[in-house]
Image (spheres, rainbow, N blue to C red):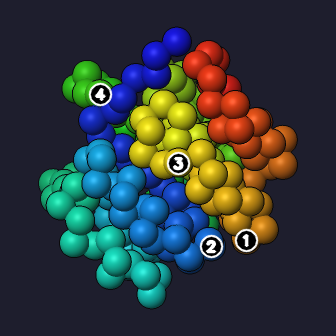
Amino acid sequence: MKVKRYDEIIADSSFYICFLDDVNRPEILHRIIKEFNFIITPLVKNEIEKSENYARIQSNKNIFFPEFSFDYGEILKAFFSEEEIIKGEHGVIGTAYILYRLNRNFCFILDDQDPRKFVVSNIPDLVKFMTGTVNFIGLCCCSYKLLKKDETLILLNQIEKSKFRIKKSILSQVKLYVGGCKNGLWYKY
């Protein structure tokens, strides 16, 4: 089964912070960003600018900070906790919905469970475009060939030992997939 290559990626702040701070691997993030157009919403930008490593990626030509006349996440704000609002998950979901309605070739990365559940329950059309950080890392290795298998497994082990929150079962599935790097079903979570 061939995995679709996306033109645009919208990610929550935990995706960027994972590389920039949690595992301190901004060079890998920089390589990934060079291969896609990354749309960074205003609140996500505010979060990731706090990282000392932000300067290592901010000038990448594939990062776009859209100047929205309207913050697409504002309409969703009432459904999210204050912590999720600060991190910008509602903006990621709102922007993803707009790209979906525009029939764009995109995916969006959400790691926090509550915003993911919100999408599943309230905007089921978006579920097939949603993924998580470690799943996307697996795709970058096995499907897109942007990362080598051994460096990806090392990265996943670093993530496991970091403060990045991920269920062990999900991490194990991705490690197994990367270890085999066989074409076939890719389990989204």
Quarter placement of the C terminus: top right
Closer to the chain start, of discs 2 and 4, is: 2
> Residue 50 lies in what quarter of the image?
bottom left
- Residue at image position (45%, 87%) is 52
Camera-nearest label, 1 or 3? 3
> Residue 160 lies in what quarter of the image?
bottom right
Q: What distance separates the C-alpha of mark 2 from that of mark 3?
A: 20 Å
Return the residue nearer the eye: 98 or 185.
185
Report how many numbered discs are placed on residues in the image. 4
Give amino acid for label 1.
Lys
Marking on residue 51: none
> Circle 4 is placed at which residue position?
105
Q: What distance separates the C-alpha of mark 2 from that of mark 4?
A: 29 Å
Crowding around mark 4 (Cα neighbors within 10 Å: few <14, some 14 to 19, many 20+) is some
Give amino acid for label 4.
Asn
- Residue at image position (63%, 51%) is 150
- Residue 119 lies, in percent from the top left, at 56, 34
Crowding around mark 1 (Cα neighbors within 10 Å: few <14, some 14 to 19, many 20+) is few
Disc 1 element: loop
> Circle 1 is placed at which residue position?
163
Disc 3 element: loop
- Residue 152 lies, in percent from the top left, at 60, 52
Give amino acid for label 3.
Lys
Camera-nearest label, 2 or 4? 2
Disc 4 element: loop
> Circle 3 is placed at which residue position?
148
